[in-house]
Image (tube, helix red, strand yellow):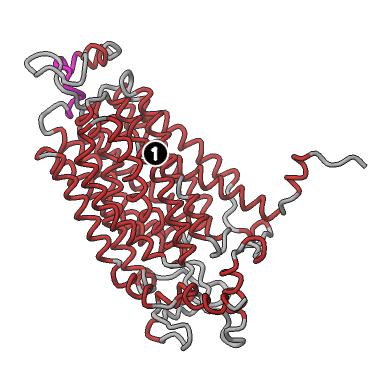
Amino acid sequence: MAPLPVGIRFIVSFSRDQWYRAFIFMLTFLLYASFHLSRKPISIVKGELHKQCAGGDGPESPFGDPSSSTRHRPTHWLLNNETDCGWAPFDKNNYQQLLGALDYAFLCAYAIGMYLSGIIGERLPIRYYLTFGMLASGAFTALFGLGYFYNIHSLGFYVVTQIINGLVQTTGWPSVVTCLSNWFGKGRRGLIMGIWNSHTSVGNILGSLIAGYWVSTCWGLSFIVPGAIVAAMGIVCFLFLIEHPKDIKCSSTLPTHPRASENGINRFRLQKQATYSEKKGPLDPELQCLLLSDGKSPLHPSHIVVLPGDGNMAAISFTGALRIPGVVEFSLCLLFAKLVSYTFLFWLPLYITSVDHLDAKKAGELSTLFDVGGIFGGILAGVISDRLEKRASTCGLMLLLAAPTLYVFSSVSRMGLEATIAMLLLSGALVSGPYALITTAVSADLGTHKSLKGNSHALSTVTAIIDGTGSVGAALGPLLAGLISPSGWSNVFYMLMFADACALLFLIRLIHKELSCPGPAAGIQAPLKEH
């Protein structure tokens, strides 16, 4: 009998469950990456919607030869903007406030809609709900770009388009997090979701490159093409998304192979948990810390949310989700962490244009380095939190390092392109790390908390509460940046540093409980030395 080819041996080495799990991982990754891909164009196009005046009575542009950026303008554009200051109504001196209003319209609608989205999503099939959101988001993203071709200069048109787009995009996050959590157990959740959450940065990078390709020649396509991609992915979602492993008779948890996949510490921990109490079963280490248990005595009843349920398990209420230990603290922390992240998302290209004197396309390409750093930051946060089993402490450490890094960024980015590149990578890692960890692994942990008594219907609501609260900060950040930036970019960075400090402040109690809790690592080192 001839030996099987290497490729076939590789395929059959994985089980049916593993292949389906990998498929869902990649599918949800691509689905939400397309959402972020459609959010990025507005930040790239800002430098084109308002330009330094190159003609008439305006000053000469400091960013290079104006003719190079106008030679491809359509005739109707030049007729309505004879001084080449940008696209009306963003060609006036108050352009920063107007552009900030566009960001605020989208993000405020997103924040408000997110609180409702999780509750609605738990009561509807995820596949249908997510498909509708992606098709609608693609349509309204493209509608913004049609303003270029139909010569629309009404601020109201662009604001209303942003508001509706913000509302329909709230269907995405609770849906994909719930679906992924259905397929993956709690083991190594930080690492798995840290890698998976890089879809945010991948989407931002692709959105920057796609929008940047047309921004200087036909910025309408910078919105239409991403909109078409989101809509196409919505069709893919409808055709292929499997909401739960039970729908296709797969296992919902990762197989445990202690010797092959766990280190010595985790092997001992699993054995110790199995013998902890035959009656009570294993006690989850994160449950110990968040519910203030010492691991030896029963959990205090005042900290447990007992939700009655039957075989069908009714969806959790909004107030019931808020009572889960840690939800409020992490939600408020994310409010300020997302404020910082989204300020970079929407204003970084314009900042680079102002400081490094680059055109809109080059600034958009350079801004992708922040997202490259974010990929590594999200994965690093997941690995560390899995290793230490201390989510709050991991977030706190990265927030503590992020504030001084932002100060250094604001100082050295004026020294040249090389300094800007280095600080973009470092800042991206430290800013995006806590944001990624809270919106993925922490949300999934709290949404499947032991205090819920197995009620999996809480996950979408908890995810929506945490991300919805964070989206309030996401709405405030770009708005404040638009209001503060006329007084100097340094003041914007001071605002961001203050927000990082506030995010850390809201985690102090949880960090204290985690550090005061012995935890699995501290409790098993001594027995391990006996071997």
Residue beneath the point at 32% across and 30% down: 364
The residue sitting at the left extreme is: 57
Is 80 magenta? The answer is yes
136 and 189: which one is in front? 189
65 and 483: which one is in front? 65
Residue 95 falls in image quadrant: top left
Q: Name the residue beneath numbered marker 1.
A: 204
**Image quarter in which the N terminus is found:** top right
Which stretch appears magenta? 79-90
Q: Position of residue 365 (x, y in %)?
A: 35, 29
Q: Is residue 86 left or right of residue 136?
A: left
- Disc 1 packing (10 Å; few <14; some 14–19; many ≥20): many
Residue beneath the point at 19% across and 30% down: 354
Residue 225 falls in image quadrant: top left
Residue 104 falls in image quadrant: top left
Q: How would you classify the magenta stretch by its main secondary structure?
A: loop
**Image quarter in which the C terminus is found:** bottom right
Q: Secondary structure under badge 1?
A: helix
Q: Position of residue 512 (x, y in %)?
A: 32, 73
- Total numbered labels: 1
Is 481 magenta? The answer is no
Q: Position of residue 146 (x, y in %)?
A: 33, 27
What amino acid is at disc 1? Answer: Asn
Q: Is residue 497 left or right of residue 304?
A: left
Residue beneath the point at 24% across and 47% down: 406
Q: Considering only vertical position in the picture, is 223 above or below 290?
A: above
